Image: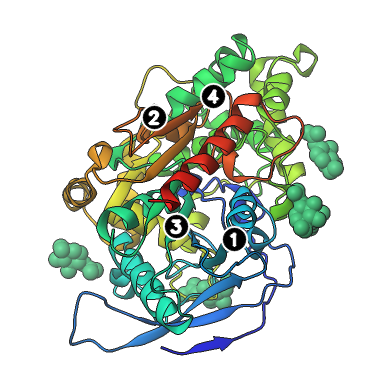
Amino acid sequence: MALQTGTFICKVIAIIFVSVVCGGQRLKGFRTFSRVQGACNETAFEDQWFIQKLDHFNGADSRTWKQRYFVKDQFYREGGPVFLMIGGEGPANPAWMENGTWLVYAQKMGALCFMLEHRFYGRSHPTADLSTENLRFLSSRQALADLAHFRTAMGEARGLTKSLWVAFGGSYPGSLAAWFRLKYPHLVHASVATSAPVHATVNFPEYLEVVWRSLASENPECPLLVKKASDTLMERLKDPKTYDAITKDFNLCSKLRLQSEMDSAYFLETLAGSFMDVVQYNQDNREFEGVAGANVTIKVLCGVMADASLGEPYSRYAAVARLMADTFSLKCLDAAYSNYQRDMSNASWDGPLSGGGRQWVYQTCTEFGFYQSTDSPNQPFGGFPLTYHVKQCAQFYNVSAETLAEAVAQTNECYGGYDIRTTRIVFPNGAIDPWHALGVTQDISPELPAILIEGTAHCANMYPARGQDLPQLAQARDHIGVLLQQWLKQ
Ligand SMILES: *[C@@H]1O[C@H](CO)[C@@H](O)[C@H](O)[C@H]1NC(C)=O
Ligand SMILES: *[C@@H]1O[C@H](CO)[C@@H](O)[C@H](O)[C@H]1NC(C)=O
Ligand SMILES: *[C@@H]1O[C@H](CO)[C@@H](O)[C@H](O)[C@H]1NC(C)=O
Ligand SMILES: *[C@@H]1O[C@H](CO)[C@@H](O)[C@H](O)[C@H]1NC(C)=O
Ligand SMILES: *[C@@H]1O[C@H](CO)[C@@H](O)[C@H](O)[C@H]1NC(C)=O
């Protein structure tokens, strides 16, 4: 093991609709987005590099690579705990070394803080490129073994072997925080697994059902208007004579062309994606991450949908698409599946989706599924069924529907899904966050408590506190702090 220092290069990754990786991109599956990554806000935190094994499950393979991490010792007091923030499916964002509720706990408890970037994301490149052949080294199991080796080696190097380590993570890294405690209980004393989808599932139609309910909680008419607009649009898509008008209405970058059901599904998913992203991150206090669009909330979108002066619901839906494009400073909306397919198939580290898009969809195809399909009748959108998502696994990575289904079953077999059993993990979730449907929202045992926060979105408790936070959000943050203090005495 060797530690090296590098320089932090502020890199904003351009993607199709939302401007930065962190911002809950509308890319399929990417909407899991962990909050601990993405957009760039320059900070004093320098890249550090850790020599990591390529394959933890083959003792005969000695290849290594450099994994990026950040460290903050400002709050550390001799004998204090070590906090490890787990990176996820995008570049690790050093803004989290300066802001975030975990640092409030760290200051109170005298903790040393680390954040470790996930293999294959951001600047942590284990292989020469992102070919499907190389992506076989990308899995949550390898990532957990990375965490274990980091904890062991860093413990030895810094005299922290006997310290109590606590893992933190939000979204997919929230699941990793839980599974790290499950699989390596001798290395990690407790975990805060925020908004963690612990149950893998190929089809995830419940996501859009929660979107319906979250829109309805703002205004009961809102999801009905969205549904009306979406139905009208789908009806018009049946007639190619409408395509010029649709191209203009939605400010598309190129004339709408629908040659296969993948094309229409991608277009419809792109438009629904605005609502999905806004619901997922509604009112989260994430400006410090450097993301645009934090002020576009459910209230704003439902306000547009209710504005009769804009015309029929279809026209209001188009207005939402233009509002989102403006918010992210896009000249037009690229809704062409062929461009998406081209970008997703680019296996270069210089490729347009190499910050995480190609990698995360690979993980959905080989571990988690999580496909936010329109297969439920109790949701507002249409036209992007499970088959659309599953076909992409074959197109991008040659993974068949059967292989996908087996892989997802194996993930639940490995980690236990909803039936995870260990101790000292807290599971916070937000009730309007669509991901809570795959999370632990009721206490499993006194040692595995759940905190379901009414009225908040994805990972709300991880963001910096502010005056207008709901009282139950402030209470949840305090509750987590109290649990950590109790557990660190055990
Ligand atoms: C982030 O941290 C900096 C430095 O401690 C502080 O000045 C700033 O107010 C924080 N921002 C938020 C949103 O809490
Ligand atoms: C970066 O973070 C600081 C402190 O939280 C904030 O004031 C500033 O607006 C952020 N910069 C960008 C570009 O978002
Ligand atoms: C969000 O904030 C930006 C920058 O201040 C502003 O230009 C934009 O109009 C705001 N959008 C909404 C919907 O309030
Ligand atoms: C991958 O993307 C990079 C950057 O956009 C581009 O230069 C390269 O030609 C692309 N590779 C392929 C095979 O398309
Ligand atoms: C795709 O997978 C099948 C079944 O595993 C295999 O036979 C085939 O060679 C693969 N095709 C490519 C292009 O890798």
Q: Distance of mark 1 from mark 2, alpha carbons? A: 30 Å
Numbered badge on residue 363: none
Left or right? Give the position of 171 relative to 466: left
Q: Distance of mark 1 from mark 3, alpha carbons? A: 13 Å
Observer-side mark, 1 or 3, equals 1
Numbered badge on residue 110: 1
Residue 336's spot in the image, x, y percent?
54, 49
Q: Which residue is pictured at 56% across the width and 70% down the height?
A: 78
Numbered badge on residue 441: 2
Residue 260 seen in the figure: no
Three-letter residue code for mark 4 = Arg
Q: Quadrant of residue 45?
A: bottom right
Three-letter residue code for mark 3 = Val
Left or right? Give the position of 322 relative to 423: right
- For disc 3, the marked residue is 166
Above or below, 220 relative to 368: above
For the residues bearing labels 1 and 3, Cβ distance under 8 angstroms: no
- For disc 4, the marked residue is 236
Q: Which residue is pictured at 42% across the width and 48% down the height?
A: 487
